[in-house]
Image: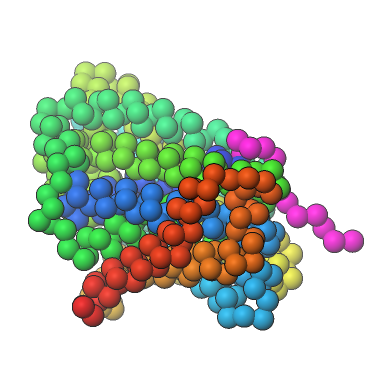
Amino acid sequence: MKQQRAKFGSKLGVILASAGSAVGLGNVWRFPYEAGNNGGAAFIIIYLISVVLIGMPIIISEFMIGRRSKSNTAGAYKKLAPHTPWKWVGRLGVLTGFLILCYYVVVAGWTLEYVYQSLIDSFHGQDKDFFVNQFATFSQSIFRPILWLVLFMLLTHFIIVRGVEKGIEESSKIMMPLLFILIIVLVGFSVSLPGAQAGIDFLIKPDWGKVTPKVILSAVGQAFFSLSIGMGCLCTYASYFSKETKLGRTAISVGLIDTFIAILAGFLIFPAAFSVGIAPGAGPSLVFVTLPNVFEHAFGGVPVLAYLFSLLFYILLAMAALTSTISIHEVITAYIHEEFHYGRKQAARIVTTTCIVVGTFCSLSLGPWQQYTLFDLDLFSLFDFVTAKILLPVGGVLISIFAGWYLDKKGIFLEEISTGGAIRPWLYKFLIISLRYIAPIAIFLVFLNQFGIF
Ligand code: PFF
């Protein structure tokens, strides 16, 4: 007898699991440093426009493709467009997911180091220079980062093998709301630090002179990365949705939650960074050297509060990363399980082991293997660049063309978005125009421009 396909148990579970995938290191770690590297407010505005005009329609498309096909992302295109090259879109997504997971888990591992350091109270009474040095020494060393990444992959593995409802849904339900509350409290502290105003200005006063093709591509790439779109992740999750799930509403909730948390993270990091004199363009270290300062300064005189907040924050950040690593792992596991007929556990073991090996290379590329570069990028940065700035946007274009043209012509688009019934005509029109024209053309132009073609 064929085993029944897994399903999410409730509406809230669907939203929290999808938002759990979207909210992660992309919001708290990557968004601030990309915004910092690309000039601040103008980048953020382009990011927001990309989320609404391109991101939201693609979330809905991925939801449709997944729910309609009830398959892993590669199988989905095979089912919906049999005997066509569309299956390559799904396969490309799996490859993209693999590359992301391999470097993402390195940073996820760092969060565990920070949980540990908070726990043993080693940040107490330290200053900015200490945090900068401490991060550099740690992230460039050999064993500790690898140890943490292995542990993080094992945590991810453990949840994946527990299955969709018990593993993914239950954990998201607890972690997401807690993270949200804690960030809001911390933002309150950060914006009241001395000198914080410069950081707030950096976030809200756009300097349009700084906008270059690189900035635009970075903003589009960040929108894709943060929303978990362009690689079949939300498509895979949607294959566990029920017939009744309202795709439009779910997409809006996910988009809002994700964007809100990214913006909050901006208001957490930049006021604090400016306050203690850390450059906004500090790169991947930004969050890790800024935040400990917030904890140290915000609770002047009450060390126990600093201790508790720091500990709790890193635990929650690790958990936010975990709900994202789970979602990427699930894309690859479901693919191997369904397409190659391995047992689910066996498939998960293959994914975990391979990611540990390649993730280790990524980690070493920041330290002892720094001198091995391609296009001037170490392996870690190369994976980040290739996925966020090339593969996700390319995947996004293909998904939008597939949904806007192929699925729409077959009537599947309308059926899925309206949950079998009616939908407001303007929304449908907006989605189709975005998917058919705006998303593909905009991304194409940005690409041509970025790579110097016009
Ligand atoms: N959206 C996640 C984050 O912002 O941390 C990262 C991510 C998850 C990217 C899942 C891609 C993906 F499929």
Say if residue 400 shows up in the picture.
yes
Percent position (x, y) of residue 369? 30, 72
Q: Residue at x 69, y 66 (%)?
A: 337
Q: Main secondary structure of the magenta part?
A: loop
Please tell me whether residue 5 belongs to the stretch shown in magenta.
Answer: yes
- 285 or 302, nearer to the observer: 285
- 55 or 230, nearer to the observer: 55
Q: Residue furthest right?
A: 1
Quadrant for the N terminus, please. bottom right
**In the picture provided, is 217 more to the left or to the right than 344?**
left
Q: Quadrant of residue 353?
A: bottom right
Figure check: 177 above or below 286: above
Q: Residue furthest front?
A: 425
- 128 or 335, nearer to the observer: 335
Q: Which residues are magenta?
A: 1-13
Q: Quadrant of residue 396?
A: bottom left
Q: How many marks?
A: 0
Q: Residue at x 19, y 46 (%)?
A: 41
Please tell me whether residue 92 belongs to the stretch shown in magenta.
Answer: no
Percent position (x, y) of residue 315? 44, 37
Say if residue 322 shows up in the picture.
no
- 157 or 35, nearer to the observer: 35
Percent position (x, y) of residue 106? 40, 57
